[in-house]
């Protein structure tokens, strides 16, 4: 008797190509899925571990040095001089009304200012960067905030502090030295944390 | 012909000396405070942009630095003092021309060192060539050449 179905030599029929392609397609699909999954995991890992958009501390040649002079007319017609702020922490904030991250940090600065106005241990001053005083007045009227805003028409204050873009802020110690440079906006918590850290370091023997 | 050589060398040395003297006497440097400010701004990098000097850029930070340079010149500060002030605020990266000390100083030292080494190498090669023994044709060589010439002239 002859076996009706021979297993030794099966001549592939034209339709059998589809059958052979199925595992190959599955393999390709699997490879693509794995690559996409690895990329997705990597993307999530980068987002989860990257530096936050605010309170970024940056190195600066000014850190540890006496703060550059900061004196001038303010937005409300008064005047401000950083030398009058001895024995208090000073946050020097550079901002512009055309800068979106500056809008984002504004409520945080307002909260910091309100809290430290009560305690009297820190003062906030902003410097208008490449902007029109009228726009700044309107911005403060709309967003709130009563801290001094120094006008810097010729950009000399920003140059002395080494400000390429806004927002950027410096924390100056009660002894008048630059302690921290923040780029990309600040938060009230970030500023308070920096002051706490420096005060703890001072208590442990390092002068802030 | 041999006497012409020292004269040629002397002439070259004279040309070099005159060129150097002219270069040192008038380096084409800035003459007015505005020219000085412009010249200094050309050596300072715009901190808010890529590949532009403060002189070329219209960024607010560059305008501020230009104002600061002009103000310092008016106050009588030297170029070095202004550059040092900018470096103290912005760091070394603010200068488009590297400083004369540290790793940046290599930019100035290496070409000079390469020139000195190249001149020393050329001098050494010339010295070796001069020291090589001059080969004189022997009597046998002359006979060989005479024979070859005679064959060429022959019928």
Image (cartoon, helix red, strand yellow):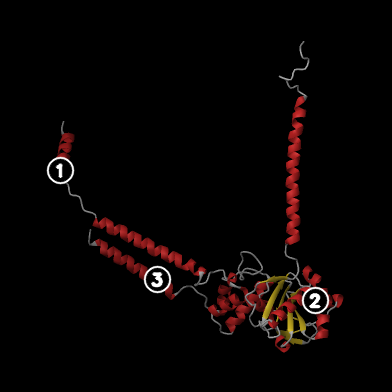
Residue A184 in the image: x percent, y percent?
74, 69
- Front one among B3 and A35: A35
The mark lying in front, picked from 3 and 2, is 2
In the displayed structure, would residue A154 be above or below residue B53? below
Chain under callout 2: A
The mark lying in front, picked from 1 and 2, is 2
Picture quadrant where residue B3 is located: bottom left
Disc with the residue nearer the chain's start (3 vs 1)? 3
User: Which residue is painted at 65% across and 79% down in the image?
Assistant: A160
**Dot 1, how many residues are within 10 Å of its Cα: few (below 14), some (14-19), or many (20+)?**
few
Residue holding disc 2: A109
Quadrant housing the N terminus of chain A: top right
Residue holding disc 1: B142
What's the CA distance linking mark 1 and mark 2? 103 Å
Chain under callout 1: B
In the displayed structure, would residue A133 be above or below residue A184? below
Residue A165 in view:
no
User: Which residue is painted at 14% across and 42% down in the image?
Assistant: B140
Callout 1: helix, strand or loop? helix
Picture quadrant where residue B94 is located: bottom right
- Front one among A175 and B44: A175
In the image, A183: left or right of B104? right
């Amino acid at each position: 008797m002859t076996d009706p179905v021979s297993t030794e030599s099966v001549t592939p029929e034209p339709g059998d190509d589809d059958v052979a392609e199925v595992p190959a397609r599955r393999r390709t699909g699997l490879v693509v899925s794995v690559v996409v999954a690895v990329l997705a995991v990597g993307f999530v890992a980068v987002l989860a571990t990257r530096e936050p958009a605010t309170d970024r501390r940056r190195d600066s040649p000014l850190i540890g040095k006496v703060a550059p002079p900061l004196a001038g007319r303010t937005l409300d017609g008064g005047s401000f001089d950083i030398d009058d702020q001895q024995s208090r922490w000073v946050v020097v904030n550079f901002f512009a009304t055309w800068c979106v991250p500056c809008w984002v940090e504004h409520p945080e600065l307002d909260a910091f200012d309100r809290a430290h106005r009560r305690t009297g241990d820190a003062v906030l001053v902003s410097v208008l960067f490449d902007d029109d005083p009228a726009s700044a007045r309107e911005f403060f009227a709309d967003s709130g905030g009563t801290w001094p805003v120094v006008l810097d028409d010729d950009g000399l204050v920003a140059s002395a502090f080494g400000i390429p873009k806004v927002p950027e802020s410096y924390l100056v110690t009660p002894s008048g030295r630059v302690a921290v440079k923040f780029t990309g906006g600040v938060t009230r918590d970030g500023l308070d944390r920096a002051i706490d850290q420096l005060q703890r370091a001072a208590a442990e023997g390092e002068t802030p | 012909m041999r006497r012409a050589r020292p004269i040629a060398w002397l002439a070259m040395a004279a040309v070099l000396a005159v060129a150097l003297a002219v270069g040192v006497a008038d380096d084409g440097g800035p003459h007015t405070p505005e020219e000085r400010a412009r010249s200094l701004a050309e050596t300072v990098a715009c901190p808010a942009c890529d590949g532009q000097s403060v002189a070329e850029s219209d960024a607010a930070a560059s305008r501020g630095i230009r104002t600061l340079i002009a103000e310092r010149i008016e106050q009588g500060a030297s170029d070095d003092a202004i550059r040092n002030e900018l470096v103290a605020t912005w760091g070394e990266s603010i200068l488009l021309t590297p400083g004369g000390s540290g790793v940046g100083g290599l930019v100035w030292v290496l070409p000079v060192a390469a020139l000195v080494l190249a001149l020393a190498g050329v001098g050494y090669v010339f010295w070796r060539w001069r020291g090589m023994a001059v080969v004189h044709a022997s009597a046998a060589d002359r006979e060989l050449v005479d024979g070859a010439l005679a064959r060429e002239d022959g019928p």
